[in-house]
Image: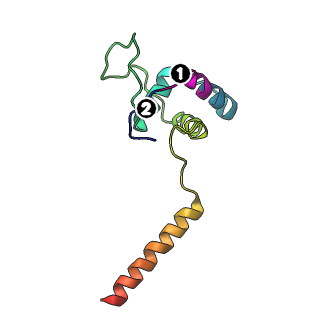
Amino acid sequence: MGGQWQTVRMGFYKDVERLVRLDARFVPKPCWIAHVLELNGCQPRVAYNRISPNERKYPCPPEKRPAIERAFRKLGRIPPLPSRREDTNLTAYRVMQEVIKRSES
């Protein structure tokens, strides 16, 4: 999903606001939501009242970004994070591949 252009459906920003309000106890500004969408590879439309198309007046604060991204994941907007078990299996796989390479040499 991320990395390709997607249109934002009506009500998406309101859904994100509700989820973040319930989860993290703050209401994100729409400009923060657009900024986090952009950081995750989506291309939100440029607001009609935006002063500069290349510069953000109110970027999303770094401490607010994880809560907004959690809401995106719940809504299926960005892919979920890999679980720790998957990371462990991947690490074990890489170690095993390294052992096989060394034994063949």
Disc number at residue 6? 2
* Quarter placement of the C terminus: bottom left
Task: Tell me if mark 1 has few (under 14), some (14-19) or many (20+) residues whose alpha carbon lies within 10 angstroms of its own.
Answer: some
For label 2, the SS is: loop
Q: Residue at x 46, y 41 (%)?
A: 1
Q: In this rendering, would 30 be left or right of 26?
A: left
For label 1, the SS is: loop
* Vertical order, 54 against 49 (above or below): below
Provide the residue span drawn in magenta.
8-16
* Vertical order, 96 against 38 (above or below): below
Q: Position of residue 25 (x, y in %)?
A: 67, 29
The tag earlier along the polypeptide, 1 or 2, is: 2
Whether residue 52 is in magenta: the answer is no
- Amino acid type for the residue under numbered disc 1: Lys
Q: Position of residue 40 (x, y in %)?
A: 43, 38
Disc number at residue 29? 1
Task: Tell me if mark 2 has few (under 14), some (14-19) or many (20+) residues whose alpha carbon lies within 10 angstroms of its own.
Answer: some
